[in-house]
Amino acid sequence: MDGQNCQLIYDAAFIVRTVTSSNVEKLLRTKGQDYAPSTLLFLLQARYVIGSFNRKTDLRQRKVITMARRQGLFLVLLSMLPAAVFQCPERCRCSGTMVDCSGQELTASTIPRRFPPATRQIQLSHNKLSTIPNGLFDSLRDLESVTLDNNPWACDCNIQYLRSWLLKQDDKSQYKHLNCSSPAALQDRRILYLTEDEVISTCDGWYCNFFLICQTLLFVLIVIQGIVVIFIVMYLRRFEAISQEAIRPAK
């Protein structure tokens, strides 16, 4: 956690301890220029909550429910805190709603798995990305553009998510220059213009291997079931023989 976030938590604790809107206003006057816009919004909301509460509660009631008020206010401040704390992904630089992860030699395994919810622009150019993890951009509702050039894209089965995401974009012009680096059959082809058959054709080997593995596992499972059935039949026959022997003396 950086220094600004620590200061924010300290100020929140100060608000809860003092519980007066005048103290919040004092913070805004003395430290307002040190806060990010989201942090200022956080403190303004805190001032509004405190002010509304003080206006609607008389002196006698305040003395009775002081402890309950502080506990409730603390929960309100905690609910506001995630919106005020802006977490930038590791190995990236953040400015407002833009996340710059360019030139970091990121791969499909090292690319950040989560971005701030309010992100509008992501820069991923000049990395070593061969694919984009499935669903990476799906939760970013405000996302407007992603810079993806200068990456060695592998146009195999794993390119399907990126291709489908590109096709859904309203402005496709900024993605027309994205080319495949491999396999050889699709080298220099534009990802945006790949056909469904071309993408599926690169999956044939993978599907064959998967099908072979499934067949092998199914065969092993059938053999195990057959062995279990044989043991069950043998046990039942032996149990029947023992039962018959136990019944004879009784007769």
Image: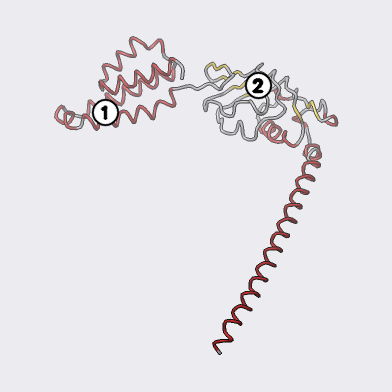
Tell me residue 214's x, y (percent).
Answer: 74, 50
Residue at x 77%, y 25% (from the top left corner): 179
Within 10 Å of the Cα at label 2, are there few (<14), some (14-19), or many (20+) other Cα atoms? Answer: many
As drawn, 12 above or below 68: above
Tell me the distance, in whole angstroms, between the alpha carbons under discs 2 and 1. Answer: 45 Å
The three-letter code of the residue at mark 2 reads Leu
Residue at x 29%, y 23% (from the top left corner): 16
Corner quadrant of residue 146: top right
Instruction: Identify the element where label 2 is drawn.
Output: loop
Residue annotated with mark 1? 70
Q: Earlier in the sequence, mark 2 or mark 1?
A: 1
Instruction: Identify the element where label 1 is drawn.
Output: helix
Colouring method of the image = secondary structure
Question: What is the number of the mark on residue 80?
Answer: none
Which of the image's four quarters has the C terminus? bottom right
Q: Residue furthest front?
A: 249
Tell me residue 86's x, y (percent).
Answer: 48, 21
Tell me residue 191's x, y (percent).
Answer: 76, 29
Tell me residue 21's x, y (percent).
Answer: 27, 20
Number of dots carrying numbers: 2
Corner quadrant of residue 188: top right
The three-letter code of the residue at mark 1 reads Arg
Q: Residue furthest left?
A: 60
Residue annotated with mark 2? 124
Corner quadrant of residue 108: top right
As drawn, 249 above or below 113: below
Front residue of this view, candidates 18 and 59: 18
Front residue of this view, candidates 111 and 224: 224
